Image (spheres, rainbow, N blue to C red):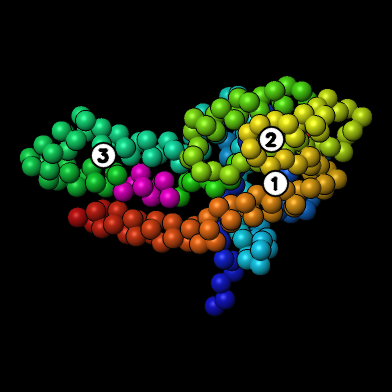
Amino acid sequence: MAKKYDFLFKLLLIGDSGVGKTCLIIRFAEDNFNSTYISTIGIDFKVKTVDVEGKKVKLQVWDTAGQERFKTITTAYYRGAMVRREMQTILFGPIATCKLTCVVIVRPRLFQQLLKHVMMVMVHYFDSVFQGIILVYDITDEKSFENIQNWMKSIKENASAGVSRMLLGNKCDIEAKRKVSKEIGEKLAKEHGIRFFETSAKSSINVEESFADLARDILLKSNKKPVSFQCVIIKWILMLIVCMFNSF
Ligand SMILES: Nc1nc2c(ncn2[C@@H]2O[C@H](COP(=O)(O)OP(=O)(O)OP(=O)(O)O)[C@@H](O)[C@H]2O)c(=O)[nH]1
């Protein structure tokens, strides 16, 4: 059977509530637009395969809720760094090391359980790393632009270090209500050394282009090696080990 894609990249959209994250994803994945606003609850994803540098890249695009009350769930999804920290504490923390040594000697069965927990964390890690994060603001809403700094801070604190980022100023079809100039958006992106596009999910401006551009950036960073495929293999091996532990 022919392989349907060469690479799989996971992207995450973040930004204030109402800036158009869901609409951008729907425009990208289904080429559709709905003006009815239904606020996202929790997290959801859509997939689309694009051609990048002659390679088929499957993008799994995750939507998040911009509302403050869902922030804990949203940031939990940046994972990479967080799970790594979790693993470091389990494996290398000073107390953990002492306890672990005692457990191996005195309670081998408990050690087995611990090992299983570590495997589970690793499975989760390989399953939840995002290669790209798209920060979205609304060009007609100054506050959503100011908040980009907070979202940037949140990425720094929670996401993995090598993650590719991109800034989108959405709703550029409503020029009459513009509050944030293109230049100021470009300036902010430049300061953070990331790509920038003004988009419109409604009028389908720069949506496909921006997603493909980010995919290209990730592809070049990954040195054209199918990293995600390796992750999937490692994930399945880890899951197999977890299943073996379960059957003891
Ligand atoms: N004019 C215009 N309206 C848009 C555009 N994108 C989204 N909207 C409208 O903005 C509103 C909010 O869009 P959503 O995509 O639900 O916003 P969101 O960022 O996902 O919001 P949360 O789920 O609350 O985080 C909806 O009424 C959309 O129709 C756009 O490009 N142009």
| N-terminal-most mark, 2 or 3 | 3
- Name the residue furthest right: 176
Residue stretch in magenta: 119-126
In this view, the residue in front, 220 or 215, is 220
Is residue 125 located in the magenta-colored stretch of the structure?
yes
The residue carrying mark 1 has its beta carbon less than 8 Å from ligand 1? yes
In this view, the residue in front, 46 or 215, is 215
Q: Is residue 147 left or right of residue 95?
A: right
The residue carrying mark 3 has its beta carbon less than 8 Å from ligand 1? no
Tell me the distance, in whole angstroms, between the alpha carbons under discs 2 and 3.
39 Å
Q: Residue at x 78, y 25 (%)?
A: 141
Q: Residue at x 24, y 53 (%)?
A: 245
Image-quadrant location for residue 105: top left
Residue 83 point in image, percent of width and height: 40, 39
Question: What main secondary structure does the magenta stretch of the protein show?
Answer: helix
Kind of residue at disc 1: Ile
Q: Secondary structure at mark 3?
A: helix
Is residue 175 located in the magenta-colored stretch of the structure?
no
Q: Residue at x 54, y 29 (%)?
A: 154
Residue that badge 1 annotates? 25
Image-quadrant location for residue 63: top right
Tell me the distance, in whole angstroms, between the alpha carbons under discs 2 and 1.
24 Å
Q: State if disc 1 and disc 2 touch (CB < 8 Å).
A: no
Kind of residue at disc 2: Lys
Asked whether residue 93 appears in the rendered view, the answer is: yes
Residue that badge 3 annotates? 91
| Within-10-Å neighbours for mark 3: few <14, some 14–19, many 20+ | some
Q: Secondary structure at mark 2?
A: helix
Kind of residue at disc 3: Leu
